Amino acid sequence: MMVTLVGAGPGDKGLLTLMGAQRLQNADVVLFDRFVSEEILAMIPDAAEKIDVGKYAGNHPVPQDEINRILLHKALNGMDVVRLKGGDPFIFGRGGEELELLAENGVPFEVVPGVTSAIAGAAYAGIPVTHRAYASSLHIITGHSKNDESPDINYGALVRTGGTLVFMMSVAAIDEICHGCLAAGMNENMPAAIVENATTCVQRKFTGTVGTLPSIARENAVESPAVIIIGKVCGLSDRYDWFSRRPLYGKCVLVPRVKSGVSVLSNKLRALGCEVIELPCARIIPLAGPGCPLEKALGRISGYAWLVFTSGTGVNIFFDYLIDAGFDIRALHRLKIACVGAETEKEINKRGIKADYRPPEYNGEALARGLAGLVRRGEKLLIARAKDGAADLTQILTELGIDFDDAAIYEKIPDIEQTRIAAKKVNEGKVDFAAFTSSSSVEYFWQAAESMDFSKIKAVCIGRKTTETARSYGMETYTAAEAAVDSIIKKIEELVNE
């Protein structure tokens, strides 16, 4: 048993530490806060118990004492417990309080520090909290005190330091904070800033002075979580602002996908500044039990001349099965490899294998017709793909008289609950694009998204077949120039710049 306090950082999934991610992956139980991002919550193992103990201003559905007792109870039952906290556990995160009961009862614990929004929020707003020419000290203050009392802040001492002041949990107290600084002798023209939802793709930054910041915050309806920054360094914000200058900043892209592994597309989109709603609208279930189609096919592997893949998921499940089954991969040496799509080919290449054929178009029809000119008389194909895969590939092969076995090595199960998360944003017109990397992702998205207005979706698709499927459900469609993730992103950038 072990309790680990993990700082989740201010929101950007990339700011979660490696140690924090590792502890999360091994957790039996995870208690999480309000400000932990959806992307980080998605990293919690499916088998782990998830307990929402989030708090809102003036609303504590799970009191702190109860949180402490839950941590103790779960640990005493032999579980590895992660307390996932926004920012850093020990910077106004009440982490010390949560350790007291554990220490009293001899429960082992550890603390994994997190990146605090006091520093990250400033950095993502282009504000260096220290600078030799402007500020040689940094002071982090909370604007929220125990029992919602007015914080006892020595503004005179803070102003005399001449350093950078960062106020956390202080949106509701912004008038009091700025008035306190002015009353202590601070120049009303001292640069100041407020950063809302720091480090996330919906971050907003507003700059002004100590005298004007309260009215700026009200005019723009700034809400928590936000950090208030006061000091000369705020004057550097426009010059050093790197975050809001990224090409897709302020855009929202929906990425419906199968829940398996890391989404390269989502990560690349986030790096360009846009909000990504990653939607696992289907779950992958490998069909790898005793007597499965793949086991039978491998038993007669010498009878095949070609091995055909239609997805990167299929490639990985196929080769992982070989490893788990102790199959000697040298038995595949006679086989030619065919696939559809650049991303599928990349997964094949990762296994140290070169594909013998990939059609220029990303669809089963192109794959079938291309193979027709390569497969010799008497040669047989093994197609390793999803159960209920698209019929065009096998239908055309049959029409052309090419012999094959269609081995279902995994199936996809619609995930209706996850898809409901995105429906509201789409219906409210808050999603700019949806990016589809396969026709099946469109199908499963449609099956799961019962209440979504598909006419409001601009679908950027990886190939002609995917585009046709999206269009059939009433979406406004655009097709990437090539069947590759980078080509989808390029098409989105082109549409944004039109």
Image (tube, helix red, strand yellow):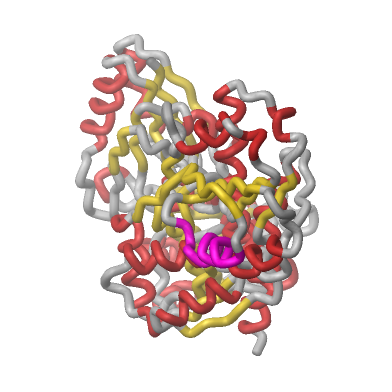
Give the quadrant of residue 290: top left
At 72% from the left and 56% from the top, the residue drawn is 375
Q: Nearer the viewer, residue 295 or 150?
A: 295
The answer to whether 97 is drawn above or below residue 473 in the figure is above
Which residue ends up furthest to the front in the rendered image? Answer: 378
Instruction: Indicate the position of residue 397 as horizontal and vertical percent values.
Output: 58, 62
The quadrant of the rendering that contains the C terminus is bottom right
Q: In the image, residue 96 lies at what x, y percent? A: 40, 28
Indicate the position of residue 62 as horizontal and vertical percent values.
22, 41
Could you tell whether 20 is left or right of 144 in the image?
right
Label the magenta part by its dominant secondary structure: helix
Examine the rendered structure and indicate whether residue 288 appears above or below residue 169: above
Identify the residue shown where x is 32% and y is 19%. 75
Left or right of 477? Residue 79 is: left
Stretch in magenta? 389-400
Measured as percent of width and height from the top left, residue 434 is found at 50, 72
User: Residue 372: in sight, yes or no?
Assistant: yes
